[in-house]
Amino acid sequence: MLDQQRVFEQLQSHGVNYYVGVPDSYLNGFCNHALANYPENTVIAANEGNAVAIAAGHYLATKEVPLVYMQNSGEGNAVNPLASLCDKEVYAVPMLLLIGWRGQGNTEPKHPQHHLQGEITPGMLELLHIPYTVLEDDDAAFAETLSKAVDYCTKTRQPYGLIAPKGVMAASEKANNVDAVYEMSREEAIEVILDHMPKDTIYSATTGRATRELFFLRERRGEGKEHDFLNVGSMGHASSVALGIALAKPERPVVALDGDSACIMHMGAMTMVSKHEAKNFLHVVLNNGAHESVGGQPSAGHRLDFTKIAEACGYETVGQAVTTKEELINALDKLNDRGKAGFIDCRIHKGLSGKLPPLDFDHREAIDALIDEMKG
């Protein structure tokens, strides 16, 4: 990993003092150093497009080149503001784009959701006419690249990409930040839900730890996985997949096992239940206030009143967040046969279950089993 102290010294020497984006495990060295040392100048955005727009606002207000950080999967979210806000034919907004390169050269064979993302990462920047450099784990080379990149941004008022392969901006091991703010772990909350929902319930689990914990809970409990959709990529869309299933299968209970960061990323999806009747749909946000799967950086999850937001969007709720197993069970009981879509903000503590190995399964086989099960 690059010496992060030197990375930030170089950035600051070139006047790059503002950092906004979405955390990524390939960038956790960068993200954690920024949060620890420059918290007043570091912003964790809702999604990557949001980050680009915030960075644009910073430039317009200060004329300082900002840095936007993201995983390469977030390039899609960033395309619109990069193409229509920052382009030289529109407002000509420069910024550095620090992009974690998952799936480079099929480096993650057990994670097919990264294959195409990895393949098209440089090409996405090329389509946007954004020049880039693939970073090396070499402090001197980084200094030269950064000087070239900032000079380009300043002279052209256009973005420049810094693509970070595995190990360049992140340590090999992620920190496991555990707290005791709330009683339940994510795994315990998911098991409570499995125990108290009907056996034919369909589950859509958000990307990250929720998919892994649901997968291995099924194995531990000796249960099949044909009722489960594991949203291994496409962060923020698990609840929309669940809603699509619920609308198509109104006779089946459908549960979205969402995360706070994922829900925030595409929060507009919550408004859909105001327009479409989906009384068989239950949306549960497993809220630990963190981007836990990529390093534990804080989210806005514990600062928000998800319950009031959900009520305003048309969900039935129990009026407050749940924080214990008993409260979760009571909420599940009260929202059973509710007459419209239900929502639970389930507050859980931080901390990864270290005993879980990475997910390794046949994605097409799994999804075909779910499709066949729903067809009956």
Image (tube, rainbow, N blue to C red):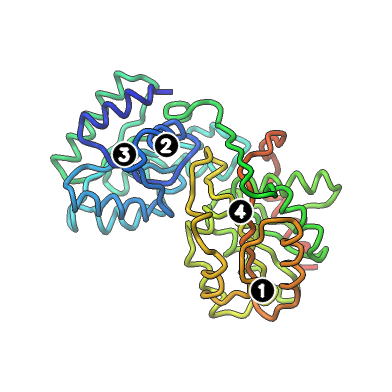
Q: Secondary structure at mark 3?
A: strand
Q: Nearer the viewer, residue 203 or 134?
A: 203
Q: Which residue is mark 3?
A: 161
Q: Which residue is mark 2?
A: 31
Say which of marks 2 and 3 sits in front.
2
Q: Classify residue 53 as left or right of residue 237.
A: left
- The image quadrant where one finds the C terminus is bottom right
Say which residue appears at 66% left-offset and 73% top-offset. Answer: 248
Amino acid on which the number 4 mark rests in the picture? Thr
In percent of width and height, residue 92 lies at 18, 52
Say which residue appears at 71% left-offset and 76% top-offset. Answer: 250
In percent of width and height, residue 366 lies at 72, 51
Say which residue appears at 30% left-offset and 21% top-offset. Answer: 141
Which sits earlier in the primary sequence, circle 2 or circle 3? 2
**Quarter residue 120 falls in:** top left
Q: Which residue is mark 4?
A: 206
Amino acid on which the number 1 mark rests in the picture? Ala
Amino acid on which the number 3 mark rests in the picture? Gly
